Amino acid sequence: MVNSEAVRTAVGIIGNVISFGLFMSPVPTFISIFKAKSVQNFRSDPYMATILNCGVWAFYGLPFVTKDNTLVITINGFGFFLEIFYALVFFIYSTWSKRRKIMLIFLGEMIFLALLVFLVMTFVHTPSRRKVIVGPICIFFNVLMYFAPLTVMRQVLRTKSVKYMPFLLSFANFANGIVWTTYALLKWDPFIVIPNGLGTLSGLLQLILYVVFYRTTNWDEDDEPANII
C-alpha cells in the first residue's frame, strides 16, 4: 500500500517543478523588454504581487511556523529572489513616474514582511498559533498573486488582444494551482487549499480568454502607450 506521505512528497516535488516553470515562464516577456529597451504594454502587477506572496509563504513553511513543509520553503525562497529581479527589470526600463510607484510598492512590501516576521516571532510563542496567524495572511497574498493578472485580463477584454497576456504564465498559473491544491488535500491544509483552488480558477479564466481572443490578436500591431501599474 502506497504511503500517503510519500505521495504527498511526490506531489510536492511536482509542484516545485511546476512552480519553477511558473516563475521562469515570463522569460520570453523579459527578452522582449530587453530587446525593446522598454516595458512596452507589459504590466508589472503580477510580479510585484508575487514578491510578497513568496515571502510570506517561505515564512509559513519554516519549521517554527508549520511542520513538514520544506518544499514550500525551497520554491518560494527561489521565487522571492527571482521576482525581485523581474521587478528590477521593470524599474530599469520604465519611465521615472512608473519607477517611483514600483519602488514605493517594493519598499512597502519589505517593511510589511519584516514587521510580520518580527511581531509573530516575538509575541506568538507556539507553532500552532503562528500557523493560525500567518496562514490567513498567506491566503490573502496568494489570492492577490493569482488575481493580479485581472488587470491584464481587463486589457484583453478591452482590446480583444492577448498580445500582452503571456500564454506560458497563464498556463503555469493554472497547473500550479491544481498541483498545490492536490498537495494540500493529501494532508489537509486549508491555508494552501483555498488560495490555490482560486488560483486554478484564475488560470482557467486566463486560458479561456486566450482561446477566445487568439484569432483577433494582431501580433504586429503598434504598442499603445505603456500603462504598467
Image (cartoon, rainbow, N blue to C red):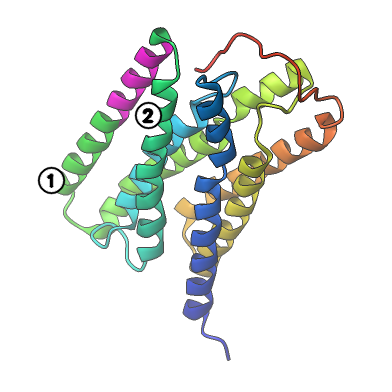
Locate residue 146: give its quadrant: top right
The three-letter code of the residue at mark 2 reads Leu
Task: Identify which residue, 82 or 2, lies in the foreground.
Answer: 82
Q: Quadrant of residue 185?
A: bottom right
* Residue 210 appearing in the image: yes
Location of residue 82 (image quadrant): top left
Q: Residues within 10 Å of mark 2 (few under 14, many from 20)?
A: some
Residue segment shown in magenta: 98-109
**Side (left or right) of 174 relative to 127:** right
Judging by the rendered image, the residue that carries numbered circle 2 is 88
In depth, the one of 100 and 135 nearer the eye is 100
Q: Nearer the viewer, mark 2 or mark 1?
A: 2
Instruction: State the residue at coordinates (54%, 58%).
Output: 180
Give the residue at x 21% y 35%: 115
Residue matched to label 1? 122
Rendering coords of residue 40 (x, y %): 58, 18
Q: Residue at x 80, y 22 (%)?
A: 218
- Image height check: is 220 above or below 23? above
Q: In the image, residue 74 lies at what x, y percent?
A: 37, 59
